[in-house]
Amino acid sequence: MKKIFLALLAVIMVAGLATAQDNVEIPFKKVPDLAQRMVKSYFPENSVVKAEKSKSKDMKNRTRVYLDNDAVLDFDKDGHWMVVDCRTSFVPMKMVNGMIQMYLGKNYPGRQVIFMGREKKNGDITILLDDSTELHFTNENTIIE
């Protein structure tokens, strides 16, 4: 699982570099309203460094927000989170679904979430913990083993 995640992360990073010219910087007020509210609610102590709108074919209508704590958040066209990547901090636990929070508390007490990604097609969620544990959940928040 860890190798799959690392390979997927590498592909995302390479795709991000390849499509960097397809990103257009936008003012934060042009970010979808739901995404703005999520950033303000879940990251109230952080400032937005910049926001970008993707114009590439595979990431069309995605918005990326960079925060001053090195967190990077990707949102779909409606403002729903697709990726929450907290490089030097942790994903706020209140941002993690309650069922997943309970699972983590029972099975991984004391661990912090540093990455969450949602699959576009089926809504499945991938979570990476601070000890490099990778977990996969269905869109109904059931663990995929």
Image: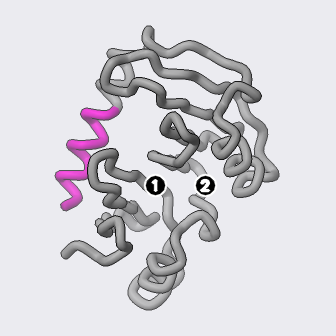
Q: Along the horizontal axis of the image, is 145 left or right of 39?
A: left
Q: Residues within 10 Å of mark 1 (few under 14, many from 20)?
A: many
The extreme right residue here reads 45
Magenta stretch encompasses residue 3: yes
Magenta stretch encompasses residue 44: no
Spot occupied by residue 96 in the image (x, y as percentages of width and height): 54, 67
Question: At label 1, which amino acid type do we have?
Answer: Phe
Spot occupied by residue 6 in the image (x, y as percentages of width and height): 26, 47
Where residue 30 sits, quadrant-wise, is top right
Q: Which residue is identified by label 2?
A: 89
**Magenta-highlighted residues:** 1-12
Residue at horizontal 61 percent and vertical 54 percent from the top: 89
Residue at horizontal 52 percent and vertical 40 percent from the top: 75
The extreme bottom residue here reads 106
Q: In the drawing, what numbered circle is on residue 63?
A: none
In terms of secondary structure, where does tag 1 sit? Answer: strand
Spot occupied by residue 141 in the image (x, y as percentages of width and height): 38, 73
Question: At label 2, which amino acid type do we have?
Answer: Ser
Q: Quadrant of the C terminus?
A: bottom left
As drawn, 8 above or below 21? below
Residue at horizontal 58 percent and vertical 49 percent from the top: 88
Where residue 115 sits, quadrant-wise, is bottom left
Q: Along the horizontal axis of the image, is 75 left or right of 134?
A: right
Q: Which residue is identified by label 1?
A: 115
